[in-house]
Image: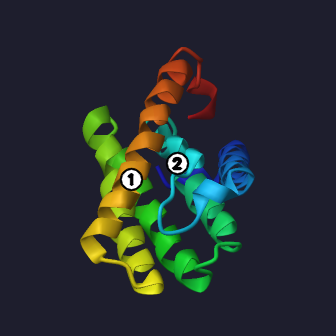
């Protein structure tokens, strides 16, 4: 799989996913950052089910978007790590879409929830739950995206 990700076509697709993720996050900045958040761009976290190129794309897109986060360096480190873990898990569980969808919900709920709890001094479990709820909303939109993309011939990207 790794070798396939290094083709020019795959790198371009990953770059487009990264740019779209970062642009959506920044466009929706008022709800993308903060103690209570719902990143609409997180709907894209189900893309690894169809395209392994989404793993580096989502990771780099998240890193780029988090450079402007109010939580700054912590969000760049831990937010990017949470997205990478979620993307890998989603790809690994791609044959089971419901389980795959739990990867970004759990990863972001735990990692981002803990990061925001420390940064803002909020209750840990409540913050994790709030992030997981926002992530669940975004992932629900991701199922619609997935349904649309399954109708498109993506074989040339694999």
Q: Residues within 10 Å of mark 1 (few under 14, many from 20)?
A: many
Residue at position x 51%, y 52% from top?
A: 38
Q: Which residue is mark 1?
A: 104
x, y (%) of residue 86?
Answer: 39, 56
Image vertical order of residue 3 relative to residue 72, above or below? above
Which residue is the site of mark 2?
42
Q: For this view, does 40 lie left or right of residue 108?
A: right
Does the rendering let one see residue 53? no
Above or below residue 151? Residue 136 is: below
Q: Secondary structure at mark 1?
A: helix
How far across and down, in percent of the image, does residue 16 sit? Answer: 72, 46
Labels 1 and 2 touching (C-beta < 8 A): yes
Q: As rendered, which of 151 and 157 lies closer to the eye?
A: 151
Q: Residue 52 placed where, x, y %?
A: 50, 45
Q: Is 100 rendered above or below residue 67?
A: above
At numbered mark 2, what does the secondary structure look like: helix, strand or loop?
A: helix
């Amino acid at each position: 799989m790794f070798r396939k990700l290094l083709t020019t076509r795959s790198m371009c697709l990953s770059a487009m996913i990264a740019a779209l993720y970062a642009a959506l996050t920044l466009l929706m900045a008022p709800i993308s950052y903060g103690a209570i958040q719902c990143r609409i761009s997180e709907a894209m976290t189900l893309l690894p089910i169809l395209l392994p190129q989404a793993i580096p794309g989502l990771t780099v897109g998240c890193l780029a978007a988090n450079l402007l986060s109010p939580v700054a360096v912590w969000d760049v480190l831990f937010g990017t790590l949470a997205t990478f873990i979620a993307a890998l898990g989603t790809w690994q569980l791609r044959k089971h879409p419901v389980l795959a969808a739990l990867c970004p919900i759990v990863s972001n709920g735990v990692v981002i929830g803990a990061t925001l709890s420390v940064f803002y001094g909020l209750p840990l479990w409540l913050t994790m739950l709030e992030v997981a709820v926002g992530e669940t909303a975004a992932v629900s939109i991701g199922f619609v995206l997935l349904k649309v993309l399954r109708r498109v011939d993506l074989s040339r990207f694999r």
